Image (cartoon, grey):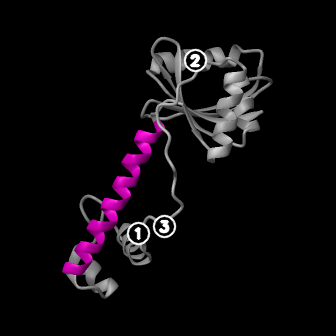
């Protein structure tokens, strides 16, 4: 089975974990990318991984795994209610200990209005968010044909939605499953 992974751990521990993965006889292939933020991303092909196999069988998706103290791992698993129940049942039957600490219903809706997306895209592409700005609010207002006060409100509301979604996802990625 081939899986994507995101390991979030202290650099020394993450390096040790990657070294152990390279030595593991059940791992057939390993691709690793290290980021500057302490994450180790990659893809692993394994001959056997009971939890990974059960995630795949249940039609769930493994979004991330982070290593926690005392030999625990925090898994973020995405799936429908039925597939998630199937996964937890399979883990119970295999006597694999786990604890669900958060269960959320994900909504499939547009984050931004079409106008917010259009204006934020133009602002981003033209350098409005750079430091120093390549384009000011007045120039952006002229470019988009929107009054400065209205444009400021559209930008603020769009940024608030994006930041709120980002922070919500960050908290979701750090929850145990």
- For image coordinates 78% across by 23% down, the residue present is 48
133 relative to 47, above or below: below
Q: Earlier in the sequence, mark 2 or mark 1?
A: 2
Residue span colored magenta: 149-173
Q: Is residue 166 visible?
A: yes
User: Marks 1 and 3: which is nearer the front?
Assistant: 3
Q: Nearer the viewer, residue 174 or 152?
A: 174
Q: Tell me how far mark 2 sits from mark 1, CA to CA.
A: 40 Å
Query: Where does the N terminus fall, quadrant-wise?
Result: top right
The circle on residue 2 is none
The residue lying furthest to the bottom in this view is 145
Disc 1 versus disc 3: distance between alpha carbons? 21 Å
Specify the farthest residue to the top: 70
Q: Is residue 156 left or right of residue 64?
A: left
Residue 8, relative to residue 119: is it above or below?
above
Label 2 residue SS: helix
Q: Could you say whether the residue bearing mark 1 is in a helix, strand or loop?
A: helix
Task: Write the residue at 57% across / 23% down.
Answer: 98
The residue carrying pointer 2 sits among few (fewer than 14), some (14 to 19) or many (20 or more) residues within 10 Å by Cα, namely some
Please give the name of the residue rendered at 37% of the width and 75% of the height, measured from the top-left corner: 119
Determine which quarter of the picture holds residue 92.
top right
Say the numbered circle drawn on residue 125. 1
């Amino acid at each position: 089975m081939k899986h994507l992974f995101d390991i979030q751990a202290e650099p020394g521990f993450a390096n040790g974990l990657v070294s152990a993965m390279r030595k593991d006889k059940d791992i057939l292939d390993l691709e690793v990318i290290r980021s500057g933020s302490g994450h180790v991303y990659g893809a692993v092909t394994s001959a056997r991984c009971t939890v990974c196999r059960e995630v795949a069988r249940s039609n769930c998706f493994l979004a991330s795994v982070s290593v926690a103290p005392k030999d625990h791992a925090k898994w973020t698993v995405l799936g429908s209610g039925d597939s998630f129940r199937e996964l937890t049942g399979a883990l119970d039957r295999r006597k694999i200990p786990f604890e669900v600490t958060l269960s959320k219903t994900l909504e499939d809706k547009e984050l931004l209005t079409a106008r917010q997306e259009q204006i934020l895209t133009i602002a981003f592409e033209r350098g409005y968010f750079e430091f120093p700005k390549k384009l000011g609010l007045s120039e952006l207002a002229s470019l988009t044909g929107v009054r400065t006060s209205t444009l400021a409100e559209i930008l603020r509301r769009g940024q608030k939605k994006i930041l709120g979604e980002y922070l919500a996802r960050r908290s979701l990625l750090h929850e145990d499953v």
